[in-house]
Image (cartoon, rainbow, N blue to C red):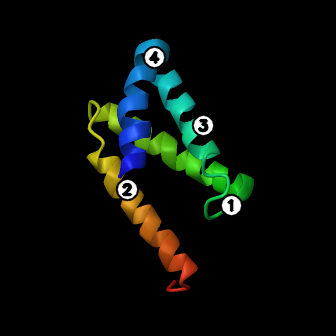
């Protein structure tokens, strides 16, 4: 997914060089969450949930030495869960 490649791939690596691992995780996660303000769920609750997801995905990416595939898989699962919620499948 392009979002993972951008936020956990290119951006996280550049931020890590400038701000260290913790700073990179926090900055990239806040940015990722902010652009999801109008996503589902929307508003500040959605930003908070997306931010928590982003912290986990970024931390996982750093743990896996820059590999984003686990984050891609988690993102796909999260998107399908949201789709199921929207379609009232669960």
**Whole-number angstrom distance, CA of label 3 to CA of label 4:** 16 Å
**Whole-number angstrom distance, CA of label 2 to CA of label 1:** 20 Å
Q: Residue at x 61, y 46 (%)?
A: 35
- Check disc 3: other Cα within 10 Å, few if <14, some if 14-19, many if 20+: some
Q: Earlier in the sequence, mark 3 or mark 4?
A: 4
**Whole-number angstrom distance, CA of label 4 to CA of label 2:** 24 Å
Q: Secondary structure at mark 3?
A: helix
Residue 47: x and y in percent read: 65, 50
Q: Residue at x 40, y 15 (%)?
A: 17
- Give the residue at mark 4: 20
Marks 2/1 in contact by CB < 8 Å: the verdict is: no
Q: Secondary structure at mark 1?
A: loop
Q: Earlier in the sequence, mark 2 or mark 3?
A: 3
- Give the residue at mark 1: 42
Residue 74's disc is 2
Marks 4/2 in contact by CB < 8 Å: the verdict is: no
């Amino acid at each position: 997914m392009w979002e993972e490649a951008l936020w956990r791939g290119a951006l996280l690596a550049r931020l890590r060089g400038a701000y260290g691992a913790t700073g990179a995780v926090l900055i990239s996660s806040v940015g990722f969450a902010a652009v999801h303000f109008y996503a589902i769920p929307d508003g500040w609750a959605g930003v908070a949930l997306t931010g928590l997801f982003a912290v986990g995905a970024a931390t996982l990416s750093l743990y896996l030495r820059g590999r984003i595939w686990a984050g891609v898989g988690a993102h796909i699962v999260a998107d399908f869960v949201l789709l199921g919620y929207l379609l009232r499948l669960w």
